[in-house]
Image (cartoon, rainbow, N blue to C red):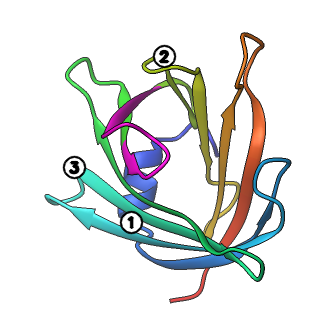
Amino acid sequence: MQGEDVLGRLANATGVYRGRGDGPESGPFVARMAVSSAIRGRAVTLDYEATNDHNGLQHIEHTVLVAGEAGRLELHVACLELPGVVRFTQTKPGEFTAYEGPLVARILLLLPQPGAISYAWWWSRDESDPREQSRAELRRTG
């Protein structure tokens, strides 16, 4: 199923997704993602937030998923941890990579089954390969 078009699948599966996440950088958290279709399914917005009991709101993100000029899918991500909007280009189904900025970052946006999203951030603070820092497993709730 993952080889199918992520954009088309999400455009047809809009709603609110909730779940839990964890990772070495984030620690345990509760996640919420609102998925909306725009421009007749040519774009999908992902409004994602992560909270925990210790820090409250620890991450907030507004992302737009679109097909780029060359036809490859792109995530355009705005969040406080990044310097402005950063473009992540799909390198494999569900895997988006950015080489801009001080560190190599990767986002995994996987749709393991209908009504489910797996959303993970990978990066490295040094020259080593990126590694998973946080992952949320979400189910559509509304």
Gap between marks 2 and 3 measured at Cα: 25 Å
Amino acid type at mark 1: Asn
Q: Residue furthest front?
A: 55
Label 3 neighbour load within 10 Å: few <14, some 14-19, many 20+: few
Left or right relative to 9: residue 95: right
The residue singled out by tag 3 in the image is 42
Give the answer, above or below, for where 119 lies relative to 17: above
Amino acid type at mark 3: Arg
Residue 53, image x, y percentages: 76, 83
Q: Quadrant of residue 3?
A: top right
Label 2 neighbour load within 10 Å: few <14, some 14-19, many 20+: few
Amino acid type at mark 2: Tyr
The residue singled out by tag 2 in the image is 99
**N-term-proximal mark, 2 vs 3:** 3
Residue 80, image x, y percentages: 44, 52
Please report the bounds of the magenta region as a residue range.
Answer: 77-89
Gap between marks 3 and 1 measured at Cα: 11 Å
The residue singled out by tag 1 in the image is 12
Q: Residue furthest left?
A: 39
